[in-house]
Image (cartoon, rainbow, N blue to C red):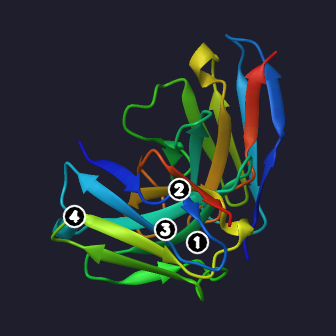
Amino acid sequence: EIVLTQSPATLSLSPGERATLSCRASQSISNYLAWYQQKPGQAPRLLIYDASNRATGIPARFSGSGSGTDFTLTISSLEPEDFAVYYCQQRSNRLFGPGTKVDIK
Amino acid sequence: QVQLQESGPGLVKPSQTLSLTCTVSGGSISSGGYYWNWIRQHPGKGLEWIGYIYYTGNTDYNPSLKSRVSISVDTSKNQFSLNLISVTAADAAVYFCARDVWGSYPFEIWGQGTKVTVSS
């Protein structure tokens, strides 16, 4: 079974800073990786699919990269509304990663 | 635009059956092209895919839940439903319905979620 790990578990940053989140697969998943954002009390929101494609309506400050086993979600300049938990998810068995919480420093 | 809304009891007794419904608005399940999923999130935890149904009735389930779960569709009501039998405290979670294109990912549209508590 392919497992996803995310690092760091928590990322403490200030608005305006750059956020770099990592997702690693236990074996190659090609580019079949999605990223979601979840705020407290809300459903997850799709940000990125196929590793680097932004979903409809997602701001350009969100970008994804990677293939194989190593993937990155980058938020170029954090806005106040970006502080949330971010999950990666792979296609083959629909498993999600454990999440990275981005909180305000 | 397409919207999803979960409904069902917020409290289920241990050993009984959890039944939830997702109502789709702004689009028709029977038009095809999409898979209709159930996903849950245990308190303070990550996300767990439960299963999907296609409008034809074709289903797929998480192997860890397969013996207890069934998903059905009612195209006349534009709804799909989740049944989870023999629930325990471990089934207490927020349950989301969601739509995807490939039967696997990405989950592009989500309902707001409904919290289910398991208690006698």
Comparing marks 3 and 2, which lies closer to the viewer?
A: 2
Comparing marks 4 and 2, which lies closer to the viewer?
A: 2
Residue at which label 1 appears: A92
Q: Nearer the viewer, residue B35 or A58?
A: B35
Percent of width and height locating residue B82? 45, 72
Q: Residue at the front extreme? A: B120
Q: Nearer the viewer, residue B38 or B91?
A: B91
Percent of width and height locating residue A72? 69, 42
Q: Say whether disc 3 or disc 2 marks the residue closer to the N-terminus.
A: 2
What chain does badge 3 belong to?
B
Residue at which label 2 appears: B10
Q: Quadrant of residue B98?
A: bottom left
Q: Say whether disc 4 or disc 2 marks the residue closer to the N-terminus.
A: 2
Are discs 4 and 2 both within one chain? yes
Distance CA(mark 3)–CA(mark 4): 21 Å
Q: Is residue B44 visible?
A: yes
Percent of width and height locating residue B14? 67, 74
**Residue B104's disc number:** 3
| Residue B40 left/right relative to B105 | right
Identify the secondary structure beneath mark 1.
loop
Distance CA(mark 1)–CA(mark 3): 7 Å
Quadrant showing the N terminus of chain B? top left
Comparing marks 2 and 1, which lies closer to the viewer?
A: 2
What chain does badge 4 belong to?
B
What chain does badge 2 belong to?
B
Question: Label 1 sits on what residue type?
Answer: Ser
Q: Vertical placement of B10 versus B19: above or below?
A: above
Residue at which label 4 appears: B78
Residue drawn at x 26%, y 47% as measured from the top left: B2
